[in-house]
Amino acid sequence: MGTSNEPFVTFSEVQKTYDGETLVVKNLNLTIQHGEFLTLLGPSGSGKTTTLMMLAGFEVPTHGRIEMDGVAINNVAPHKRNIGMVFQNYALFPHMTVEENLAFPLQVRKISRSEVTSKVERALEMVQMPEMRKRRPAQLSGGQQQRVALARALVFDPKLVLMDEPLGALDKQLREHMQIEIKHIHERLGVTIVYVTHDQSEALTMSDRVAVFNDGVIQQLAKPSDLYERPENSFVAQFIGENNRLSGRITALNGGACAVEIGSQGETAKGEVKATPISVKDIGSQTTLSLRPERVRINPEGGIYANQFDAEVQELIYLGDHTRCRVSVLGNSNFIIKVPNAEGVPSLTPGQTVRVGWKPEDCRALDAF
Amino acid sequence: MSVTTSPLLQGSLKARLRRAERVQRLRAIGLVAPLFIFILITFVVPIIILMTRSVDNPEVAENLPLTMAALSDWDATTLPDEAVFAALVEDLKTAQASRNTGLVGKRLNYEISGARSKLLQAGRAAEKMTAGPYKEQFLELDDLWGKVETWQVIQRAGEKITSFYLLKSLDLQRGVDGAIVQVSPDQRLFVDVFIRTLGISTMVTVATLLLGFPLAYILATLPVRHSNLLMIFVLLPFWTSLLVRTTAWVVVLQTEGPINDLLLWTGLTDERLQLIFSRFGTIVAMTHIQLPFTLLPIYSVMKTISPNYVRAARSLGSGPFHAFWTIYFPQTMPGIAAGCLLTFILCLGYYITPALVGGPTDQMISYFVALYTNRELNWGQASALGGILLLATLVLYAVYNRLVGIDKMKLG
């Protein structure tokens, strides 16, 4: 989405600590392009919200530099940054009507009355709520409040909009609807959005790029599809989507292929798996293999499915379009296979022994988890 | 389905519902009843009884019945005739026998100063009177009996229900022709006292708000471990007896006390200031006592205001003060209203503190209620003053309800 090669926002070597003992954000380097939809994704306490608050100006970095359009903004007060923000519980001013809420950022900017009216009007139309203008926030449903909060963050035409888990309080259906709506508004206005969430499906649906946070560090910054299909470490593989893990030791490593002996240290090996090395160092080191459940075949034909093992079916869960099949393979009894509900798929029964297989390129050897 | 549509069976359904819920209802009544009865006996009934005292007027009517009957066809402009005086002698003889002359004298004394001793004198004289004409004998006894006003007062005081005490509480009285007029300027007292009571209460309320609001803000925004310690300091006065706190202020503020010592030592003043037995002392001591009452409702409201509101305002371009004033402050209004109303109403009833720390011109209405109850034994006047104070409080409450809405008030 980048419209210019100059980065819009840059974090360089940013650190943040609240108590002087532990770093909440460790050495953060991040660039955000103009017009980009960037999501900061991670479990709670991973530093994503702190990063957002530093960008908004509510927290000051302990170390490092945050730049916007090439100018350091570390010491710029929040109200001078011209950044729109949508808060977790919307933070609509309860003593003001919808209209007054939307007019607030315009009035503090001393914009003329007629222009305020027309901008408020346009913002209300953008979120399809012109008839709600006289209502108080308490008289609106969660979804309506969310729209007003969105309109308020956009009404003064900021170049950057921050969103802190804005859909967290909505039910699933409304959340999915709002995801699409925010995405469309982003595309229409071309505004840069930095979005914080702990919901991975939300991140994958909406973002141009996703930064996965854990323990104060960005684990991987990539497009949604790369994040899912090409995780660079075990945390990302485990955090994004469903993942089968197999632990073992590297026995052979050459270029784009490696062989891994499955089993914990000191145990006799349960079998050897051919995999693609991603973040492994050398022969003999420990590794965790990551394998997506939908990449495993039952009763595969030979050839490309170079890894083939016997598995015992433990449990079947019928989910309509597919069946989740938990099997025991290579000593892992929590191995999940997604069997599509299509013609030609064998019917399974618990206790049955089947042959399962997967391609080496779908099986990624990552750091030992 | 057909069971519920039949009206006959519907009735029985309602009956069954009532029966099913009876136990629940009885339980609820049983839980509430002790407190309800307690409040009824110790609070509601005494208030009603005392309120009736403010219009109750039995002394003259019960002890001078014949005189009152004789006065019923009096023209009220000339001196009454012999028949009235004869009736008075009869009444006084009965009153002397039952030792009630003093009671009548005391009642008349409220309106004519010195009437009590003159009535006792007349009572003693009446006992010795055997034959008329009584009118001359009375006129000889004292000037009092020769004045038309005296008889007008007796006639009015003889009514079983009187507006005398209530009017007196507002510095009003019935004039010669029965119209309501102001009392003579040297007797005016209570209007000033009511204004003073409202004035002191307002000042204390404003002072507690000015001191309490910033403190409440700090308490609500500080991390819990710091705010807990501060909160203990705020609540300490709560756990100390009111009398102890007030006496402590006497010690601190007295002319030879530490504050005056400090002022002299620092050279801020050349002579010792009159800090105690003054309006200043009264307001300082009352503010200290009332501070938690104003602060706590504000604090509890502030606790519920998410910091995100101010953050949102800041992100929308509003400076720190503007965000505080337009976004944070309006949301604290329910707490401010609750705290100020609580403090103001409590201040209206202050008695001990002004009595100990204030001077003669700082006494509030409760002081006079106590004075009339304990010293003057004029319960009619005490009840009337209390009644007007209660009415003023209720009016205030109603106005508040109209402006803010009592349902918006948050005490915690």
Image (cartoon, rainbow, N blue to C red):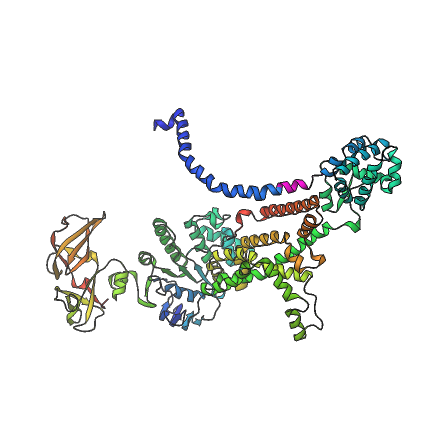
How many marks the image carries: the answer is 0
Q: Position of residue A123 (x, y in %)?
A: 46, 53
Vertical placement of B140 versus B299: above or below? Answer: above
Q: Position of residue B81 (x, y in %)?
A: 86, 32
Q: Is residue B61 above or below residue A87?
A: above
List x then y, in percent, for residue B165. Answer: 72, 43
The residue shown at (37%, 70%) is A23
**Rendered residue at 34%/51% (across/down):** A176
Q: Quadrant of residue B57?
A: top right
Residue B29 visible within the image? yes
Residue B4 is situated, as x and y percent measured from the top left of the image, at 37, 28
Which quarter of the rendering shows the N terminus of chain A? bottom left
Q: Which residues are magenta?
A: B48-57
Q: Please identify the quarter of the rendering in which residue B282 is found.
A: bottom right
Residue B223 part of the magenta-drawn span: no
Closer-to-camera residue (A198/A300): A198
Q: Is residue B353 above or below residue A261?
A: above
Q: Toward which corner of the image does residue A62 lie, by quadrant?
A: bottom left
User: Residue B50 lies in magenta, yes or no?
Assistant: yes
Comparing B266 with A314, the one in front is B266
At 66% from the left and 51% from the top, the residue drawn is B366
The C terminus of chain A - image quarter: bottom left
Could one spot residue B319 in this view of the protein? no
Residue closest to the eye, B206 or A286: B206
Residue at 45% from the left image edge and 63% from the top image edge: B224
Question: Does residue A17 appear left or right of residue A332 in this picture?
Answer: right
Q: Is residue A39 left or right of residue B177?
A: left
**Magenta-drawn stretch, dominant element (helix, strand or loop):** helix
Q: Nearer the viewer, residue B36 or B397?
A: B36
